Image (spheres, rainbow, N blue to C red):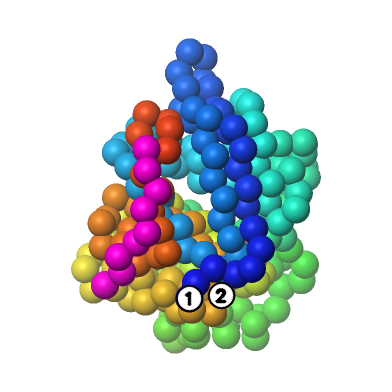
């Protein structure tokens, strides 16, 4: 699916500095509602730093990032947490599931922090990713691909405006990579805005366009080729 009519994200003159190291240097980027943007580039180029700032998990040293009409640069940590909870779904390479909770409970805990836990709704979310029959399994009883699909169910349970994924297929074999990518493609077709950090050229080619970072700066932005 192509872009929506309005800008969901507007990044202007974004810098992130750690001591004397510039992790991001004057990044300018717009993302429209419904777009899939793949952020690519070598290790250390600033991809995850950029994703963390968009996801309200880090703050810029300088510049502005406007998400759904709100300038994140002006918010404190409590306000950033609220924005992340209410508007963003996060999918991580390392899964970050709570090991002593079942798959179902890992999804429901995201509901708990947002509003009210709803077991039926959480089961439906697991069903969507093909894991309803694994709802009562602990993360340690699930394969890597199944754990990542629990992460996707958890990310979607609160109907976020924006889905952010950091190397979502990085720890998966080819079979599970295709399952996870198919789920992301379905979300894109439904109109979700998706930003993915990936080293995988195939995954990167599936969105609307690719943003290439190098040494903290955007080197190029190209239309993705798809499959």
Q: Provide residue 222's location: percent of width, then percent of height.
A: 36, 53
Q: CA distance from mark 2 to mark 1?
A: 7 Å
State whether residue 47 is above or below residue 164. above
Q: Nearer the viewer, residue 149 or 182?
A: 182
Q: Residue at x 42, y 64 (%)?
A: 208
Q: Residue at x 58, y 33 (%)?
A: 14
Disc on res. 1: 1
State whether residue 171 is above or below residue 155. above
Circle nearer the viewer, 2 or 1 = 1
Q: Nearer the viewer, residue 53 or 82?
A: 53
Q: Residue at x 48, y 13 (%)?
A: 20
Q: Residue at x 47, y 63 (%)?
A: 36
Q: Is residue 223 magenta?
A: yes
Q: Nearer the viewer, residue 83 or 69?
A: 69
State whether residue 68 is above or below residue 115. above
Q: Is 35 on the left or on the right of 204, as rendered? A: right
Query: Total of numbered circles in the picture?
Result: 2
Residue found at the far left of this picture? 174
Magenta stretch, residue numbers: 219-227
Q: Secondary structure at mark 2?
A: loop
Mark 1 packing: few (<14 Cα in 10 Å), some, or many (20+)?
A: some
Residue 3 showing in the rendered view: yes
Q: Is residue 160 magenta?
A: no
Q: The C terminus is located in which quarter?
A: bottom left
Q: Is 19 on the left or on the right of 178, as rendered? A: right
The reply to whether discs 2 and 1 touch (Cβ–Cβ < 8 Å) is: yes
Q: Secondary structure at mark 1?
A: loop
Q: Provide residue 213's location: percent of width, then percent of height.
A: 38, 39
Of the image marks 2 and 1, the number of the one nearer the N terminus: 1
* Residue at the disc numbered 2: 191
Residue 124 placement: quadrant: bottom right
Q: Provide residue 177's location: percent of width, then percent of height.
A: 29, 68
């Amino acid at each position: 699916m192509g872009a929506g009519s309005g800008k969901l994200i507007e990044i202007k003159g974004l810098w992130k500095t750690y001591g004397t190291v510039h992790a991001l240097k004057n990044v300018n980027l717009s993302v429209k509602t419904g777009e899939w943007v793949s952020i690519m580039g070598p290790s250390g180029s600033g991809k995850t730093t950029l994703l963390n700032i968009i996801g309200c998990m880090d703050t810029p040293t300088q510049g502005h990032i406007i998400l759904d009409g709100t300038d994140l640069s002006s918010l404190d940590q409590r306000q950033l947490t609220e924005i992340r909870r209410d508007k963003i779904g996060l999918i991580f390479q390392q899964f970050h599931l709570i090991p002593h909770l079942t798959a179902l409970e890992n999804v429901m805990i995201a509901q708990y922090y947002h509003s009210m836990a709803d077991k039926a709704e959480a089961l439906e979310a697991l069903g969507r990713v093909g894991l309803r029959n694994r709802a009562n399994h602990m993360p340690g009883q699930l394969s890597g691909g199944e754990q990542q699909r629990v992460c996707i169910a958890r990310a979607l349970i609160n109907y976020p405006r924006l889905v952010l994924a950091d190397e979502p297929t990085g720890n998966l074999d080819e079979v599970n990579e295709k399952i996870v990518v198919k789920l992301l493609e379905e979300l894109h077709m439904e109109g979700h805005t998706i930003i993915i950090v990936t080293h995988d050229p195939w995954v990167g080619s599936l969105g609307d366009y690719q943003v290439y970072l190098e040494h903290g700066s955007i080197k190029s932005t190209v239309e993705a080729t798809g499959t």
